[in-house]
Image (tube, rainbow, N blue to C red):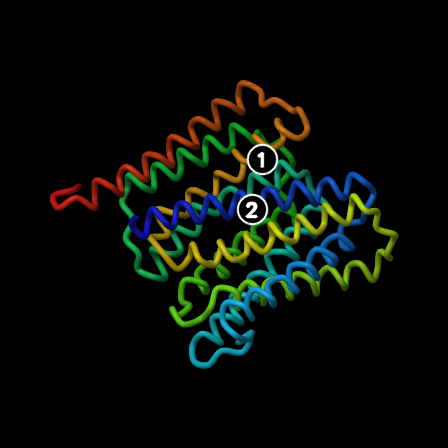
Amino acid sequence: MSDNSRGVLLMCASMLAFTLNDTLVKAALVAGMNLFQVISLRGIGAALGLMVLALWQNGGLNLWPAGPDRKFLILRTMGEVGATFCFLVALEHMPLANLSAILQSLPLVVTLAAALLLGEKIGWRRISAIVVGFVGVMMIIRPGAADFDQWSVLGLGSVAFVVLRDLATRRFSSGLPSTTGALWAAISVLSIGVVGATGQGWQPVSLVAGLQIAGAAAFLIMGYIFAIMVMRVGEIGVVAPFRYTSLLFAIILGWLLFGTLPDQWTMIGGAITVASGLFILQRQRIKALPNGG
C-alpha cells in the first residue's frame, strides 16, 4: 500500500473517530450535561488513556522532546488550543450550519498552505476536485444567509489554527511518537474544559452519561492519534480532501442512531463529495505510473 493510500485510510479513520466522539458528546449534552464538564471529563479519560498507551508503546511519556520537534510540538499545541477556543466561542454565538460551512474550507486551505509553505506540488485537476468536493459539502450543509460578523471571523480563526496544527505536525521527525503529540492535544483541550467548567459549575454524572463520556474519550484518543499519523504520510493534497468524509459519517450515524434520513440535496451533495475524493485517488494512481500524467 502506498503512502497516499495509507494517508487516505488514516484520514477516513480519524474523521470516523472524531464523528463518533461528537455523537457521544451530543448524547451526553442531550441528557443534561453541560458542555465544559463533558469536555473536562472526556479530556481526563483521553489523557489517562494516552499516558497508558505511551508507556506501553514507548516505555515512557517523552513529553519534552529535544531538537526541532520541541518547537513544532509547541506550535501544534498552540494550534490545537486556538482552534478549540475559537470554535467553541463562535459556536456559542452563531448557527452551527454557518460555522460548519466555514470549517469545510479546511481541505482547500490546508492543501494550498502546504503548497505555499512546504513546497508540495498540486495540479489544477486536484485543486478542481477539492473545490467540487467543497460544493458538495455546501449542498449538504446549505448554510443560511446570516451576516458575516465577528463570530464568523472567529470561525476563520479556527481554520487558521487548524492549518498551523497540521503543518506543524507535518514537520515532526520520524523519531517523535504520535502519542506524544496526541497527549499534548488532550491535556491542552482538557485545560480549556476545566477553566470553562469552573465558571459553569459541576453536576452529578449518571451511569449512562458516564459511559457516553468514556466512549467519547476512547474515540477521541483514536482521532488524535490518527490525525497526527495522517499528516506524517502521503501528500497533503491527496489526503486533505478526505476530511469531507466526516459529514458523510455524520449522515450515516444520524440515520442509524437517531432515525434522521438525509434529504435529496444531502444525498446529491454526498455523492459529489465522494466522487471528488475518488477522482483524487484515481489521479494519484495515474501519476504513480511510469508514464502517468
x%, y% of residue 158? 58, 53
Q: Earlier in the sequence, mark 2 or mark 1?
A: 2
Residue position for label 1: 250
Q: Quadrant of residue 116?
A: bottom left
Residue 243 left/right relative to 292: right
The three-letter code of the residue at mark 1 reads: Ala
Numbered label tally: 2
The three-letter code of the residue at mark 2 reads: Ala
Badge 2 marks a residue whose secondary structure is helix
**288 in relation to 63, above or below:** above
Residue 16 left/right relative to 38: left
Count neighbours of disc 1 (C-alpha within 10 A) and say few if under 14, some if 14 to 19, many if 20 or more: some
Instruction: State the residue in front, 50 or 172.
Output: 50
For image coordinates 63% across by 61% down, the residue present is 49
Residue position for label 2: 17
x%, y% of residue 233? 36, 56
Residue 90 left/right relative to 119: right
**136 in relation to 5, above or below:** above
